Image: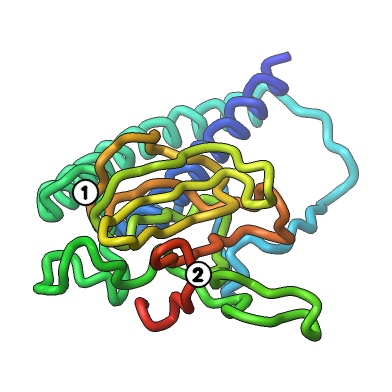
Amino acid sequence: QLSKKANALQDEIDQLTQLESDLRRMSGAGPAQDDGASDGSGLTNDGTSGKHDGQGGPYVQQPSLDNVSEALDNVEKDIEKRRASLLELQEQLKAQQESLGTPGMVSLPGSLVGSTVSVTTPTGWPARGEVSSPYGLRWNGSDFHPGIDIANDMGTPIVATADGTVTTAGWNSGGYGNMVDIDHGNGIMTRYGHAMQVVVSAGQHVRRGQIIAYMGSTGFSTGPHVHYEVRVNGQTVNPVSYL
């Protein structure tokens, strides 16, 4: 029973370590100072970052008082490491938010946060990633794509590309899944589809660079990405010229 409990506690610590790693990646904070786990999990020498999951060893060995005690000691040490690492991450995030001036803001390549470009003009990328599907005809001409798809890992932050007022925030039954629409005035609006989670609400005023959702694969989607549209007077235009 002690062996099972020690194993369960180690599994929970491993999950916390992975969660911290995801939070650090999403926020742009630096990596943890420790290796992530005293048992060596999470280490890699080929850049695969844990994409392979093969496991093995000798045939099943029955636990003893000695190795269960050692395992519990390691759990105790790991808890102290995670506590220290999470406190350090908290300080990094506080400093990051203070430097950006507004909580929940993320600077992306080309976002021009703080630039002289009008804050109500869509500018820059709504998320980090690569364009997986362009604007226009696709799939041998069988579909017209009214935006661009930017693909990345599940949970990648999605930000507003200009100041404006959220007009829609939530589920869309037309294939966009969890979706956010932002009205920027002067007939310009932007749309962000397929989110895993939406973190703004209709009627809320948002600023360029503010996190509005997290990348997912809801609605008509084959994998995690954000579908990004720019509309002018109700008509879609190619978002590439606004990136």
User: Is disc 1 surrounded by few (<14), some (14 to 19) or many (20+) residues within 10 Å?
Assistant: some
Residue type, numbered disc 2 = Thr
Q: Which residue is mark 2?
A: 236
Query: Residue 10 at what x, y percent from top left?
Result: 59, 32
Q: Is residue 17 above or below residue 150?
A: above
Please indicate whether residue 238 sits to the left or right of residue 96 in the image: right
Drawn side of residue 95 relative to residue 219, left or right: left
Q: Is residue 211 above or below residue 201?
A: below
Point 55% across, 70% down: residue: 147
In the image, taking residue 212 as reference, residue 42 lies left or right, namely right
Q: Quadrant of residue 227?
A: bottom right
Q: Name the residue: 39% across, 67% down.
A: 232
Q: Secondary structure at mark 1?
A: helix
Q: Kindly tell me whether residue 41 is visible in this rendering.
A: no
Q: Nearer the viewer, residue 177 or 75?
A: 177
Task: Tell me which numbered mark, 1 or 2, is placed earlier along the sequence.
Answer: 1
Residue at position x 44%, y 65% in the image: 231
Q: Which residue corresponds to the image point at 34% horizontal and 49% vertical from the top-left? A: 211
Distance (Cα) linking label 1 and label 2: 39 Å
Residue type, mark 1 in image: Gln
- Residues packed near mark 2 inside 10 Å, few (<14), some (14 to 19) or many (20 plus): some
Element type at marker 2? strand
Q: Are marks 1 and 2 in contact (CB under 8 Å)?
A: no
Q: Quadrant of the N terminus?
A: top right
Given residues 162 and 224, the one toward you in this image is 162
Q: How many labels sit on residues?
A: 2
Whole-percent x and y of residue 168? 45, 41
Q: Which residue is mark 1?
A: 92
The quadrant in which residue 139 appears is bottom right
